[in-house]
Image (cartoon, grey):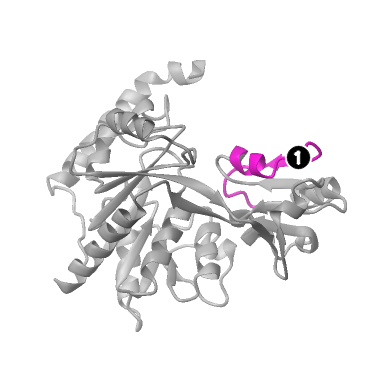
Amino acid sequence: MNLLRKILFPFAILYGFITSIRNYLFDKGILKSTLFDLPVIAVGNLSVGGTGKTPQIEYLIRLLSDKYKVATLSRGYKRKSEGFILADAGSNAEILGDEPFQFYQKFPNIQVAVDADRTNGITQLLSQNEKPQVVLLDDAYQHRKVKAGFYILLTSFGDLYADDFMLPTGNLRESRSGANRAQIVIVTKCPKDLSVKQQDEIRTKLNVSCSRKIFFTFIDYDDYIYNKEEKIAVSEVKNESKLLLAGIAKPVPFFNYLKYENNECLTFPDHHHFSDSDLEMIHNKAQNRKIITTEKDFVRLKDSELASQLYYLPIKSTFISNHQNFDATILEYVKSNLEN
């Protein structure tokens, strides 16, 4: 913890007090939460960014979209638009935000919407001719004006909420007790070989009630890189000089997966909008080398002057064990909610 964060400790206490009062008012019904008459699954975290929400939402889409009409609803972070927008053929990353646009491009059989006001967003989705049967709320754990029927809380292996503190001293948006709203806690970005003993130690540290299920996942990288026209095996490019480009919260694992001594790595802020000067700088550094980026960055860059040498590496969230239990829990919630 750096000196400035230590100095700001009194503000963290105040911020924690304010968020605790807010949660108390929602818990007691003094502040209104809207409960919708369909399954609503909220995925989020207690901390600021970098827990792997996008691959977890994609996991749920794959699990549910063959059986149900699924919609995702995000706020569309850093989009250059306002209000409710339902993705269509004219949408792009600037209109929707990078992650929702990624959902729209990868999963053409679902509805993708953005709205900072999640209550209005769901209401608008339900007013469409094609109404969703399930709504997935992306990064909405603290958006308590909607009462989701099911909450999934994510926390990173290397940055557990149990080891963190309130903003601005730490990175928590609310106190650790907020974990008690979740039916499922997923520890993301774990080592693939995380032992049962280590898992049990983390369960003890997180200190959630026995009624809440805890799962462990790792980031699984694809065997291929892709662009608009082709795919190339990672094994073919791993030992060649290339430019690695990432505008995500925690890019080190991405860089390490493609590690080679002659690589050059460029890091930009999360959700970065690339300017003309950025593109020129990237082009000059890359020369005639391949540029490999994340899928989230690719949706912002695929139509730029870099397109001819630009590739992306997909990722997915994979359970270390017991994914059948997770799948069954989600499917049972959706099925029973629709039946009732």
Q: Seen from this angle, which residue lies furthest bottom?
A: 129
For residue 113, above or below residue 253: below
The residues colored magenta run 252-275
Around disc 1, counting alpha carbons within 10 Å, would you say few (fewer than 14), some (14 to 19), or many (20 or more)? some
Residue drawn where x is 54% and y is 63% of the image: 102
Q: Is residue 301 above or below residue 112?
A: above
| Coordinates of residue 297 in the picture (x, y in percent) | 63, 54
Is 144 magenta? The answer is: no
**Viewed as shown, does residue 29 lie left or right of 324?**
left
Choose top left, top right, bottom left or bottom right for residue 68.
bottom left
Compared across the picture, whether 274 is left or right of 156 comes to right
| Image: 265 above or below 224 | above
The residue that appears at 48% across and 41% down in the rendered structure is: 189
> In the depicted view, which residue is nearer to us: 70 or 21?
70
Q: Which residue is mark 1?
A: 260
Q: Is residue 209 left or right of residue 151?
A: left
Q: Quadrant of residue 19?
A: top left
Residue 275 visible in rendering: no
Q: Image quarter for residue 178?
A: top left
Query: Could you tell me how many numbered marks the image carries?
Result: 1
Is 255 colored magenta in this rendering? yes
Q: Residue at x 39, y 32 (%)?
A: 160
Q: Position of residue 140 (x, y in %)?
A: 35, 52
Report if residue 122 is visible in the image. yes
Q: Secondary structure at mark 1?
A: loop
Seen at 52% across and 58% down, the residue is: 99
- Of 182 and 100, which appears nearest the observer? 182
Question: Residue 271: where, in percent of width, then height?
Answer: 57, 49
> x, y percentage for residue 22?
23, 40
Type of amino acid at the residue the image marks with label 1: Tyr
Quarter of the C terminus within the rendering: bottom left
